[in-house]
Amino acid sequence: MPEKVEEYCLRMTDEVPEYLLQLDEYTHLHHHSPNMLSGSYQGRLLAMISRLVKPKNILEIGTYTGYSALCLAEGLAPGGLVHTIDVDERLKPTHDKFIHNSILADKIKVYFGDAKSLIPEMAVCPDLVFIDGAKRDYSAIFNLCLPMMPSGGVILADNVLWKGNVLEEDMDERSRSIHEFNEMVKRCDEVNKVMLPVRDGLFWIVKK
C-alpha cells in the first residue's frame, strides 16, 4: 500500500491511544529493529479484529515491546486475558514501563521462553492467536494451537509476505519457512482463510 494511501486510511480510522504513541516513539529510540512494531494502522486493525472476536483468551507469540498485545487487549471479553510469549528477557524493562503501568495491565500476562515448549504447559484454550515470532516456527505454532481452539477461533499470522520474498524462486531459510507455512494453511480444510496485503502481509484464519 502506498505510504500516502496508508496515511489517509489512518486519518479516517479511530485515533491511536496516547500510550501506544509513546510506546512507538520509545521503541524507535531504544530498541533494535523498530520495524518489528505492528504500528498504528495494523495496530488499529488488530484491535478491531479482537473486538469482533471478543476473545476470553488471546495467545500471542512474539511480544517484542508489547504494542500488539496492548492493541489486542482492547477487544477482550470481560475477565479476558492476553497470554503473550517472547524469547528475549531483555525486553522486560520496557514491558514494565508500558504494559504493566498501562490501563490494560491486568489484562496482559507476559511469558519468556520457547513458545513451542510453553504453549502445551499453559492449559489455555485461546479464542484468538497472533503469530509474530520466529518465522521458522510458524507451522509448528499453528499445528499446536489449532486443536486447542474452538470453532470460530481466529489465528492471525503476521509478515506472511516477507517483503515479497515468498514470491522468489531462490528463497532464504526464513522466506521458505513462511512460504511453506502459507502453503500449509492454504491446503488446510479445517479453516477458512484470507491473506490481507496489510503492511508485510497478514493471514486471517478462522477455524471451521
Image (spheres, rainbow, N blue to C red):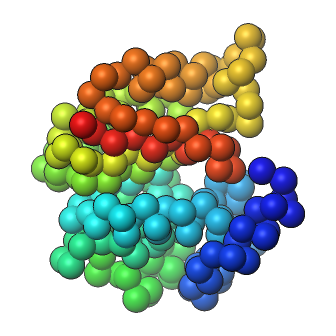
Residue farthest top in this picture: 169
Residue at position x 65%, y 43% in the image: 197
Give percent across and percent down for residue 146: 26, 36
The residue that appears at 51% across and 26% down in the rendered structure is: 182
Please tell me which residue is depicted at 53% across the width and 58% down the height of the picture. 64
Instruction: Please indicate whether residue 71 sits to the left or right of residue 104 in the image.
Output: right
- Residue lying at 17% horizontally and 53% vertically, measured from the top left: 124
Answer above or below: position of 84 versus 48. above
Query: In screen coordinates, is 88 left or right of 128?
Result: right
Front-most of residues 140 and 9: 9
Please tell me which residue lies in front, 37 or 188. 188
Left or right of 136: which side holds 13? right
Where is residue 165 shown, x and y percent of the image?
73, 26
180 or 203: nearer the viewer: 203
Q: Looking at the figure, which quarter contains the C terminus?
A: top left
The percent position of residue 74, horizontal first and vertical second, equals: 40, 75
Q: Is residue 11 above or below residue 171?
A: below
- Percent from the top left, x then y, of residue 7? 79, 68
Residue 68 in view (yes/no): yes
Image position of 170 with respect to 201: above or below: above
Q: Residue furthest left?
A: 123
